[in-house]
Image (spheres, rainbow, N blue to C red):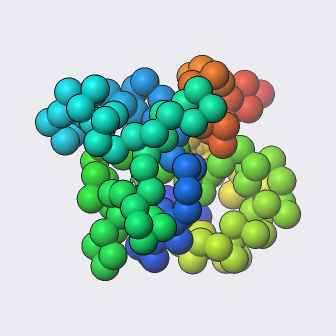
Amino acid sequence: MCAVFDCRMCGHCCQGEGGIVLAPKDLERISVFLGLEQDIFIERYAVMHNGKYKIRTGEDGYCIFFMQGKGCSVHEGKPDICRAWPFFRGNLEDAVSLHLAKEFCPGIEQSVTHAVFAAEGKRYLLEQGLLATDASQSAAALVLPQVCEVK
Ligand code: SF4
Ligand code: SF4
């Protein structure tokens, strides 16, 4: 939670196929959280797509860790890409993307301007250590460090 975002637990962002990338640090964190060896975690819960591991989708079309009415069942161990929403690269760089994100996600403060959203988002990502560490392994929507450089 921060000044421009407060998740309403609607689950929209946990729905869909193949969007939740597991970079090496995510695999380590979520495996430890679940008390599993990484290879066991991968076998049970991940798929490889375009060279990156991603969390499996359940038969209901949601992330396999999403529980209807309860939200994320691995909240403390969830990947950086889930922690970074709604401060994705596109939403920080483009006002139209932010407009669409507001329609999709009721947790984004509807009245926030793009400039304030982008400034708050960069501050949040820096503070939380949620920048892309390696473009070949990190989720494409994570912001690269140079985007958040203090000028
Ligand atoms: S779409 Fe927004 S409000 Fe809904 S669960 Fe995701 S972050 Fe929370
Ligand atoms: S790991 Fe949690 S927050 Fe991320 S998509 Fe799955 S249920 Fe949603």
User: At which x and y percent is residue 13?
Assistant: 53, 64
Q: Out of 8 and 124, give the one closest to the viewer.
A: 8
Give the total number of marks visible in the rendering.
Answer: 0
Q: Quadrant of ligand 2?
A: bottom left
Quarter that holds the C terminus: top right
User: At which x and y percent is residue 44?
Assistant: 29, 42
Q: Dividing the picture into quarters, in which one does residue 136 lie?
A: top right
Q: Dividing the picture into quarters, in which one does residue 31 lie?
A: top left
Q: Out of 130 and 80, give the one closest to the viewer.
A: 80
Which residue lies at the image location 18% right of the left edge and 33% below the top edge?
36
Q: Out of 150 and 74, give the one closest to the viewer.
A: 74
User: At which x and y percent is residue 15?
Assistant: 51, 66
User: At which x and y percent is residue 149?
Assistant: 70, 27
Say whether residue 34 is left or right of residue 123.
left
Which residue lies at the image location 51% right of the left edge and 47% below the top edge?
20
Say above or below: 37 vs 80.
above
Which residue lies at the image location 42% right of the left edge and 71% below the top edge?
60
Which residue lies at the image location 31% right of the left edge and 69% below the top edge?
67
Q: Is residue 127 visible?
A: no
Q: Out of 111 and 106, give the one closest to the viewer.
A: 106
Say whether residue 119 is left or right of residue 123.
right
Say above or below: 117 vs 83.
below
Say whether residue 138 is left or right of residue 68.
right
Q: Is residue 125 visible?
A: yes
Q: Dividing the picture into quarters, in which one does residue 137 lie?
A: top right
Quarter that holds the N terminus: bottom left
Say above or below: 66 vs 147.
below
